[in-house]
């Protein structure tokens, strides 16, 4: 019997899976903590963590135990009936966020779509915006998901072209510019939807006074502040929410990715009853949203975050990572941005594309992902060991040297 190789699996995928991704040529079959193993037994340090969906590492014992226990009990009831996992989960998640209500969904895009509906309904029913006129302000360079409404307000041609007609009702303003944001608000504006750090755009961190200004302006103008913390939240940046680092509390948090512990898709809109309470039975829903398996895993994730231990680890390891990366500036690296264990590294475009750097990192046993030309991002699981992190930076240094930096 012959063993299937990387090439076999890549071939099958290429032939029968739609080509909506361009993966690195590695075929992963196992994972533990921050490390994954490919089909030929080679180990790699995972420095992407599934875009922050695996913040707690692969196969975290507490999360796997919660999932296994729930698998043996019940996994899906639909919201036509109550289940004994949802109530405790939403109570714990609301407490973690300092809010009183949770709308459970599955994917990040669904959380964003749900928040758009909630904001519009709030606008008509509470703020008194004339019917069908609601507008939502977003930021240039945003990434909030892939559904038709969400790509309607993207400025990324790849995300958007040939997928119209687009959903109206959005205004995009420069990211990081509170004056532009304020100027775009009028009596139809129901919400401002932004990422506290723009992930897909290249880990863009706005000026320190930006989020406080957004909070002040939205409060003054009776507009909801919706923070998409799907990638920035749940420990990644050294806090439960990146908004916390900026000293602000939005009206709605959008969570996803790490909320499912890397096991099942779990997303949520978290806010107070004066906003989320606008939804009435039958107006919104999801067959899988709030299912007992998702709720059990999500609850275990909240329990991990409740101690603050992971946030602190991301903060400490993050400082170390950023300090080490900054030493590469001028040696193949142009700039380093980010917060906590999240770094966007601009490689000198004369040297190589981000993709080339990621391919060479892969050869050396480090898995990372490029974004937008010559930026690479690092977002290892928070459980990563400091020595492994150092080793990954050594590999990046090695790649840059090899490229002639
Ligand atoms: C990943 C992401 C989403 C979309 O989440 P999906 O689960 O892929 O639908 C939305 N917003 C941000 C900031 C993200 O990083």
Image (cartoon, rainbow, N blue to C red):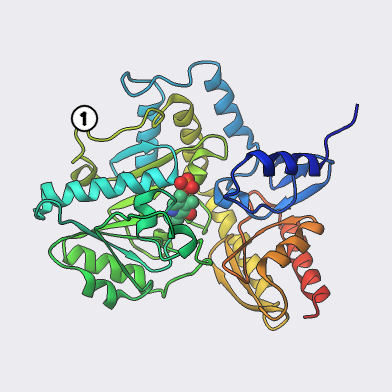
Q: Is residue 66 left or right of residue 196?
A: right
Residue furthest to the top in view is: 73
Residue at the image point whose x is 55% and y is 16% from the top? 72
Q: Residues within 10 Å of mark 1 (few under 14, many from 20)?
A: few
Say what secondary structure mark 1 lies in. loop
Residue at the image point whose x is 53% and y is 65% from the top? 339
Q: Is residue 99 left or right of residue 130?
A: right
Q: Judge by depth and name the residue closer to the eye, 80 or 325.
A: 80
Residue indicated by mark 1: 281
The location of residue 357, given as percent across then percent down, is 72, 67
Residue 374 sits above or below residue 81 on the image = below
Residue at the image point whose x is 84% and y is 41% from the top? 40
Q: Judge by depth and name the residue closer to the eye, 1 or 38.
A: 1
User: Residue 78's image quarter?
Assistant: top left
Q: Is residue 256 left or right of residue 342?
A: left
Q: Judge by depth and name the residue closer to the eye, 89 or 187.
A: 187
């Amino acid at each position: 019997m012959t063993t299937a190789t990387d090439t076999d699996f890549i071939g099958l995928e290429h032939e029968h899976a739609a080509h909506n991704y361009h993966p690195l040529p590695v075929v992963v079959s196992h994972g533990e903590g921050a490390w994954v193993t490919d089909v030929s037994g080679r180990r790699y340090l995972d420095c992407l963590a599934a875009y922050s969906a695996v913040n707690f590492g692969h196969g975290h014992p507490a999360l796997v135990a919660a999932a296994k226990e729930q698998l043996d009990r019940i996994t899906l009831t639909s919201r036509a009936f109550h289940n004994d996992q949802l109530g405790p989960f939403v109570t714990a998640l609301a407490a973690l966020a300092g809010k009183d209500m949770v709308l459970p969904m599955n994917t990040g895009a669904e959380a964003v779509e749900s928040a758009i509906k909630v904001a519009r309904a709030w606008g008509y029913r509470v703020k008194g915006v004339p019917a069908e006129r609601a507008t939502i302000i977003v930021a240039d360079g945003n990434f909030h998901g892939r559904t038709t409404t969400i790509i309607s307000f993207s400025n990324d041609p790849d995300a958007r072209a040939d997928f119209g007609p687009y959903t109206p009702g959005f205004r995009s303003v420069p990211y990081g510019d509170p004056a532009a944001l304020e100027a775009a608000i009028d009596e139809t504006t129901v919400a401002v939807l932004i990422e506290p750090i723009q992930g897909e755009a290249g880990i863009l961190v706005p000026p320190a006074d930006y989020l406080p200004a957004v909070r002040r302006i939205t409060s003054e103008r009776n507009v909801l502040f919706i923070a998409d913390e799907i990638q920035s939240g749940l420990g990644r940046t050294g806090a439960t929410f990146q908004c916390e680092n900026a000293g602000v509390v939005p009206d709605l948090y959008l969570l996803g990715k790490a909320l499912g512990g890397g096991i099942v898709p779990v997303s949520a809109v978290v806010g107070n009853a004066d906003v989320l309470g606008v939804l009435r039975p039958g107006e919104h829903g999801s067959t899988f949203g709030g299912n007992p398996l998702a709720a059990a895993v999500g609850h275990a994730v909240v329990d991990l975050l409740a101690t603050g231990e992971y946030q602190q680890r991301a903060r400490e390891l993050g400082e170390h990572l950023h300090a080490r990366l900054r030493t590469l500036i001028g040696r193949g690296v142009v700039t380093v941005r980010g917060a906590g264990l999240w770094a966007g590294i601009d490689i000198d475009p004369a040297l190589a594309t981000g993709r080339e750097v990621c391919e060479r990192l892969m050869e050396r046993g480090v898995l990372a992902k490029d974004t937008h030309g010559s930026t690479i991002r690092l977002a290892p699981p928070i459980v990563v060991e400091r020595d492994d992190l150092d080793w990954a930076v050594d590999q990046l240094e090695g790649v840059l040297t090899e490229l002639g930096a």
